[in-house]
Image (cartoon, grey):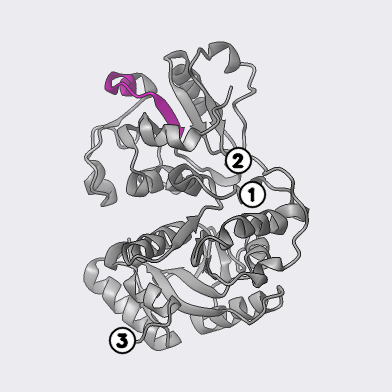
Amino acid sequence: MTTENPQSKIQNGKIAILLHDGINGLHGKTGLSLLRYSQADIVAVIDRQSAGKSLPELTKIPRDIPIVASVAEAIAFDPEILVIGIAPSGGALPDEWFEEIKAAVASGLSVVNGLHTPLANNSEIIPLLRKPQWIWDVRQEPQGLTIASGKARTLSCQRVLTVGTDMAIGKMSTSLELNATAQHRGLNSKFLATGQAGLMIAGDGIALDAVRVDFAAGAVEQMIMKFGNTHDLLIVEGQGSLLHPGSTATLPLLRGIQPTDLILVHRANQTHIRNHPHILIPPLPIVVQLYEMVASVGGALQPPRVRGIAMNTFHLDEVAAKAAIAQVETETGLPCTDPVRFGADLLLDAVMNIKK
């Protein structure tokens, strides 16, 4: 049982986010992104590790939402929708979380599921559903796909892609901040999601990792062509990294988007791929050259350029963050800032070639 417009229902419903061990752990980026960027009415966060603590103190996100230990405790806040905010490696659903989801459905909640494990046709979930409940499995392949042809380069709009030195370092946040800044300036800009959290927040885009590899670049191209003629600036959420041995998402994005501009995202002081200490991150000027070179052989009309560096400084205090940003500006000769912490104006100026 699904809904025709689930994203609008998220915006208009009361939400509880399932985020066990995700606030302070490594797999909570979906839920944390919703907390930071979604305008939805989030009434409870479910995290057994952080129950009873202050969300703003733990995350620096200025939303005073109670953290509870279980779905049963969240029910007291009258949610209508349970959003699975955890994104474990591989997108699989652990058994203990499945029991929580069953409890939510049995209590009358609809479910937004961003994991690879589908729920809408699950034999244990279906009998528990009652009208008007629904399940949205976010990771679904678009219809009518073909292989890419490079035709996005025929568009006149600017097409900005965020790329990264690693996975899960802030490409979506950077894209959202850039788009918000562009719209605040009155630009005809649009954010396009390529992952489950972005789709939950913005609605338009694709779940790229649900697309068969032969059609991945074609799915991206289809998305770009849908919006490219009605907007002056498309800002596309990046996925993966050319440096990561397990990433398959960056190449289809480069080929399908035919980007005119790139923003490189990097976590301050990170020297190797997370969980792979044997894979070092090269000096950033080399990473810039790598992305520009690979993007240029994807069929672009003109080679795109990295216009700036978005620095993730969440783990640093403000003094250390500004020092790290200044160091990278000196190292690369490119404008650099933390767009979440200090705003995205500097990066947007670079994209729009506005000289200060």
Res. 326 in view: yes
Question: Does label 2 or label 1 sit earlier along the sequence?
Answer: 2
Q: Which residue is drawn at 48% across and 24% down?
A: 101
Q: Which of marks 1 and 3 is nearer the N terminus?
A: 1
- The reply, left or right, for residue 171 in relation to residue 61 is right
Q: Name the residue: 49% across, 19% down.
A: 133
Residue type highlighted by circle 1:
Asp
Tell which of 324 and 225 is nearer to you. 225
Q: What residue type is labelled 3?
A: Lys
For disc 2, the marked residue is 139
Measure how far apart labels 1 and 3 are at the Cα level: 39 Å
Question: Tag 1, which secondary structure?
Answer: helix
Q: Earlier in the sequence, mark 2 or mark 3?
A: 2
How dense is the environment of label 1, judged by Cα within 10 Å: few (below 14), some, or many (20 and up)?
some
| Residue 187 or residue 91, whichever sits in front | 187
Q: Which residue is drawn at 37% across and 29% down?
A: 13
CB of mark 1 within 8 Å of CB of mark 3?
no
Q: Which range is magenta?
A: 73-83
What residue did someone put label 3 on? Answer: 356
Location of residue 8 in the rendering, given as x and y in whole percent from the top left corner: 44, 36
